Image: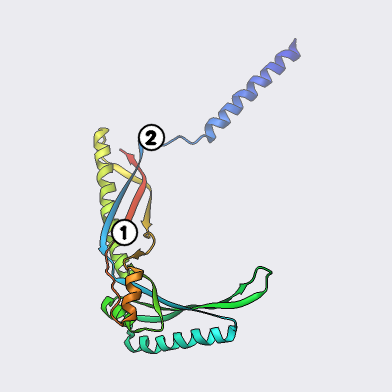
Amino acid sequence: MKNTQKVIAYIAFSAWAGAGFAQTNLQPLPAQRVNLSAQSSVQVAEDLLTLSLSTTREGTDAQVVQNQLKTALDAALVLAKKDAQALLMEVRTGRFGLSPRYSRDGKITGWQGTAELVLQGQDVARISATAGKLTTLSVASASFGLTPAQRQAAQAQAQNQAIALFRQRATDIAKAFDFGAYTLGEVSVNFDEGGPPNYRASMMAVRAEAAETAPVPVEAGLALVSVSVSGSVQLK
């Protein structure tokens, strides 16, 4: 009987000690904490044009095809570099390569190659006029975007607006729950880097105009830059 009482007492003590240990290590959840978010978007004029011009050649001799591509690209580079100017229009080469063409039995029957030249800058008129002069290449794509300075300025504006909206919402929520103020908890700021490039040129029209050495028809638009703020506040 005495041994049974000792066992019962030991079990009771162990349960009490375990409960006490759990209580001392349990972190209390914060009270009056509210999670919220805010977002702001700013429309800004696109100020960076990227024009890609290219040509393709085919033949049975890889070296001949490569030389044809090089000749076409070199001729375009000579003309483009005459109009090049830092920031306004920069010139660089793009893709340049050959790939074999195979017959049904797996033998090489010929070669196909592509050469590309890229014009990029803030002077739309200069770039479109230069592209029209490059008769050895035709325009493959035209896209507008934002320069780093333009994007940073838009992000700063959107960030200020998003933070102001976040603070206003926190103040309104505190008042709605009859609290006088709040303190910030953990907050994160996220920037939307934008979607795919904005294409604003008809490729059929571009090719026809370029063949006549006329300026390539392009038109800039507006880009949307967004910033979101999310986090928690402690009502007090």
Label 2 crowd (10 A; few <14 / some 14-19 / many >=20): few
Residue at image location 34% in from the left, 65% down from the top: 199
Quadrant (top left, top right, bottom left, bottom right) of the C terminus:
top left
Callout 1 secondary element? strand
- Dividing the picture into quadrants, the one containing residue 91 is bottom left
Residue at image location 41% in from the left, 84% down from the top: 136
Number of labels in the image equals: 2
Residue type at mark 1 is Val
| Residue sitting nearer the eye, 78 or 38 | 78
Residue at image location 37% in from the left, 64% down from the top: 197
Q: Kindly identify which numbered label has been placed on residue 100.
A: none
Instruction: Please say if 134 is above or below 161.
Output: below
Quadrant (top left, top right, bottom left, bottom right) of the N terminus:
top right
- Dividing the picture into quadrants, the one containing residue 21 is top right
Of callouts 2 and 1, which one flags the residue occurring earlier in the amino acid sequence? 2
Q: On the rendered structure, is 231 left or right of 102?
A: left
Estimate the spatial distance between the alpha carbons at disc 2 and disc 1, rounded to whole Å.
36 Å
Q: On the rendered structure, is 115 left or right of 128?
A: right
Q: On the rendered structure, is 13 left or right of 49?
A: right
- Dividing the picture into quadrants, the one containing residue 4 is top right
Residue type at mark 2 is Ala
Label 1 crowd (10 A; few <14 / some 14-19 / many >=20): many
Residue farthest to the top, as pictured = 1
Mark 2 — residue?
A: 31
Point out residue 84 in the picture as x, y percentages from the top left corner. 34, 85
| Residue sitting nearer the eye, 122 or 162 | 122
| Residue sitting nearer the eye, 108 or 144 | 108
Residue at image location 27% in from the left, 38% down from the top: 173
Residue farthest to the front, as pictured = 104
Point out residue 200 in the picture as x, y percentages from the top left corner. 31, 66
Mark 1 — residue?
A: 225
Q: How is the image coloured?
A: rainbow
